Amino acid sequence: MPRTSSRKGPTNSSASSNSSTVDLFRAASGRAASKELERIDQLFYSYSSDGSSMIDPEGIESLCSDLEVDHTDVRILMLAWENASRETRILHPGKMVLAQDEWRRGLKALRADTILKLKKALVDLEKEVRRPSNFADFYAYAFRYCLTEEKQKSIDIESICLLLDLVLGSQFQAQVDALIQYLKIQSDYKVINMDQWMGFYRFCNEVKFPDLSNYDPDQAWTLILDNFVDWLKSKRG
């Protein structure tokens, strides 16, 4: 005669208890997330103008002061990149501001709802941005972030020199110093466009410096870089 199993399925009472525990956990998590968002918003309002959904340049300066970083510190640009969605990274913001929805997105990702937490998060953020998989996107975003007018496609040489040093200086100081020197003395270009800007990054990544031994002008470099290399070679005699 077959033996009957002694195992018993969950009783209605135990199933109900498990369900209640899950519901309580979800409710607690929801309350915690809501409180975190509330603190993120309060932090935003402390830097935005009354009733504004933007932190303007003056508010950004106040934020930088509280973070104890200069408003020209590259980590502020990295914070703007982190806050921006993929879509707004592709379309330039048009103004040097931080929008509330982007602020929420960025600070939630960084798990920073106080200035102290944000200050600590900037250290990890810089490491994240400097990963090769992220840096090219950030580098392109830096150019778009400085397009402050509608339909603007290029940036003046003086501003480009400052931006190059800010974004690439710590990684490629020798290349950046030489490029800035050239940009300041040449007279063929008054402004730089996105293709030229991205070419500078490619040059720093791919070309052996200072010997330039692997620079091939037939590899579709922009003309400004061909001229830059010719200038470097002429300096050596």
Image (cartoon, grey):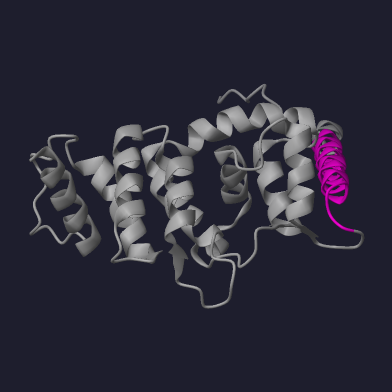
Which image quarter is the N terminus in?
Answer: top right
Q: Give whichever of 164, 26 is nearer the camera.
A: 164
Determine the image quadrant of residue 21: top right
| Residue 77 seen in the current view | yes
Q: Residue at x 78, y 34 (%)?
A: 66
Vertical order, 162 against 6 (above or below)? below
Which image quarter is the C terminus in?
Answer: top left
Percent position of residue 128, x then y: 50, 35
Q: Give whichever of 56, 80 is nearer the camera.
A: 56
Q: Residue at x 22, y 55 (%)?
A: 225
Horizontally, residue 3 falls left or right of residue 227, namely right
Percent position of residue 227, x then y: 18, 57
Main SS, magenta region, reads helix
Residue 27 forms part of the magenta stretch: yes
In the picture as drawn, the residue positioned furthest to the bottom comes out as: 151
* Magenta residue span: 21-49
Count of all numbered marks drawn on residues in the image: 0
